[in-house]
Amino acid sequence: MSILFGVIITVASLLGGFMALGGHLSVIWQPWEFVIIAGMALGIYIIANPWKVVVDTGFATVQAVTAAVPKERHYLDLLGLLHALMREVRNKGRNEVEVHIDDPSSSEIFKAFPTVLANKALTHFVCDYFRLIVMGSARSHEIEALMDEEIDTLVRSKLKPYSSLMTVAEGLPALGIVAAVLGVIKAMGAIDQSPKLLGGLIGAALVGTFAGIFLSYGLVAPLAQKIKLVREARCRLYIIVKQTLLAFMNGALPQIAIEHGRKMIGPGERPSIDVVENETIAGAAAKGAGAEQAAKAGARA
């Protein structure tokens, strides 16, 4: 909710300062100026972007407003899943591992880490590269190059709402001038009226310039920046997978490999190594034992 809090501070400072200077809010309240600017900006945005990006911008805005970034539980579940799958690769045969990665929604391992399973794109990413590891024919540097390309493509796709909104933000001041020019045209049509009426029309026209600059630098650009930060944080999960699997492919033990992944988490959100060990090693063992018992019970039944 930091965005809403920031908007309240921004608008309150703007209107409060204007009133403190002796201004009248009725002069600023020119709804049709805002309709002209916002409507043109929306139309231009739709023209310039595929519909998929337009829709994704809505999702990105919701994520930014709700601060939908990975929390400690998301990181712990991801590291726990990777640890469990790496143990399966080391200790069991190819067929047994493929059962989990071919149908993750039915896998007891994936079910034990619901935040990962709920992220379908991340789940597919994990399964795809574990499938390559199980096949055993790909080299680590080849996997790394492939991961880099896929992650780069993913990040560029996820940041399209950011770059598109920044383009709109750069154009809003010009759209404000367009609205102001229309207001001046209206004022010129009343040139024979009283100075008081004419001054009001000219003041209303100048609101367009104000509105375009304010919407650009006060709302749209900060929102775009927030979207960028949130989307980059969500993409960080893929970097964790990459570093963990590369360490594993280069011979690291599962508990060492997940430490490579843990180091990819930002210092402010990074769980301690003790917490990770409890959640992955001890926790995964307990979940695995529970799953085996459930499977045995089902077989007896």
Image (cartoon, rainbow, N blue to C red):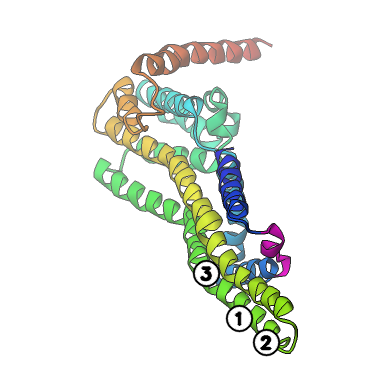
Q: Position of residue 37 (x, y in %)?
A: 63, 69
Instruction: Choose the circle earlier in sequence order: 2 or 1.
Output: 1
* Disc 3 from disc 1: Cα separation: 12 Å
**Main SS category, magenta section:** helix
User: Disc 3 or disc 2, which is closer to the eye?
Assistant: 2
Q: In the figure, residue 210 lies in which quadrant?
A: bottom right
* Disc 2 from disc 1: Cα separation: 10 Å
Instruction: Choose the circle earlier in sequence order: 3 or 1.
Output: 3
Q: Relative to 130, is 204 above or below?
A: below
The residue carrying mark 1 is 181
The residue carrying mark 3 is 173
At numbered mark 1, what does the secondary structure look like: helix, strand or loop? helix
Q: Name the residue nearer the viewer: 13 or 4.
A: 13
Mark linked to residue 188: 2
Q: Amino acid at mark 3?
A: Pro
Q: Amino acid at mark 1?
A: Val
For the C terminus, which image quadrant? top right
User: Disc 3 or disc 1, which is closer to the eye?
Assistant: 1
Q: Is any part of residue 131 visible from this angle? A: no
Q: Position of residue 138 (x, y in %)?
A: 30, 43
Residue at left offset 53%, top offset 51%:
223
Image: magenta residue range: 24-32
At numbered mark 3, what does the secondary structure look like: helix, strand or loop? helix
Q: Position of residue 220 (x, y in %)?
A: 54, 57
Q: Is any part of residue 264 visible from this angle? A: yes
Please check the rendered image and state whether residue 279 is part of the magenta-colored stretch, yes or no. no
Q: Relative to 195, is 97 above or below?
A: above
Instruction: Choose the circle earlier in sequence order: 3 or 2.
Output: 3
Residue at left offset 70%, top offset 67%:
35
Please check the rendered image and state whether residue 26 is part of the magenta-colored stretch, yes or no. yes
